[in-house]
Amino acid sequence: MRKRWLLLGLCAALVAFIAVGCPGQEPDVGEDPGGDGEPVNKVEAITAQWEDSAHAMAVESAVARDGCLICHNADAFQAGATAVADVGGGDQADVPSADCETCHQDRGKEIKDSGITQTPYGQISFGSAALCASCHNGRGKGPDQSSAPHASVQLDMLIGIQGAEVEDHVYYSSAHAGISSSCNFCHMTDTDDDFASHTFAMSNDVVEEACGGCHEGLDTLNREAKGDFDGDGDVEGTQDEVEGLMESLESAINDELDGGSFETGHGQIIFTDSAGTEIDPPSEALYNAAWNLLFVRADGSRGIHNTTYTVQLLQQSLMQVTGEELPEADIR
């Protein structure tokens, strides 16, 4: 049973991206916005930001791997290719994971302008953020109790899907998913030099611009939570509450393993007992708890993308693993 304000048919208004001056375009030079007598070459400034972002950091094992390279290999993304052979094969290790052409020309531009993209969960309409959703999704769980969350589950978390859910519990998606051009609106705030940030990073320095339109007066990403979610007796910041739940859940999983451990490898969650012998299969509660813990970690926002769904997944898994209620916590 699931209550959804928003599933996969997300309709967001298009917000225009800036022209970044990719190859073939004239450089966009500002008129001394900093007041120091030196004009700002926006192409150079944006490129410098991009070079320091995760988008410029290619994962060598993925740029030349079938199924992975479409998001990790700039040439494959533009071709819509999922196999190395489709982009000529050979050594692709020097291909950047994403560059300006990836987002602003050809296939990337088409997705951004149309606001529609194909994901493992079907076609979605997501405004210009459809471009982000093309790759920032979790691919879904495998058919058995072994698969691990992919490291890019931001779309899933935002709209509240693909967590390991408890039957008959009502789960919620986030109002953030309904923001016009959702990802870009928050992660590409205007810089002092009059172009959208291409670090894509969130910090307290940009929180007023990114979040202030809805959360008036907010000066921190770690805004006060609407309850004591981790049950430690204090209502702390949302991210602190989520971290408290994550610590409690990890501890509960380790207690259940009684000296064993769990880790990810080759797209799977691997559980071992105290002797180092693999546990196959683990209990459903144990697997679901590990999935949810890794799912929240992979999202990376510590509850900001979708506070309620994040808290629900962690709280329900904690109760499933321990077999105990959380009487001191505000349950979602």
Image (spheres, rainbow, N blue to C red):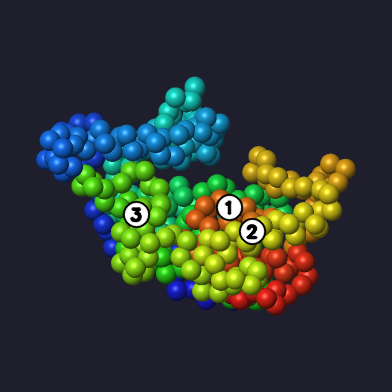
Q: Nearer the viewer, residue 111 or 296?
A: 296
Q: Which residue is mark 3?
A: 206
Residue type for callout 1: Arg
Left or right: 149 as drawn, with respect to 11: right
Amino acid type of the residue that numbered disc 2 sits on in the rendered structure: Met
- The residue lying at 51 percent from left, 49 percent from top is 152
Can residue 296 be seen here? The reply is yes
Q: Position of residue 30 (x, y in %)?
A: 15, 40
How busy is the neighbourhood of tag 2: few (under 14 within 10 Å), some, or many (20 plus)?
many
Name the mark on residue 246: 2
- Above or below: residue 175 compared with residue 34: below
Residue drawn at point x = 58 percent, y = 56 percent = 296
> From the viewer's perspective, is the residue at label 1 or at label 2 nearer?
2
What residue do we see at 35% from left, 63% from top? 211
Write down the residue under mark 1: 297
* The quadrant where residue 29 appears: top left
- Mark 1 → mark 3, Cα distance in angstroms: 22 Å
Nearest to the eye among marks 3 and 2: give it: 3
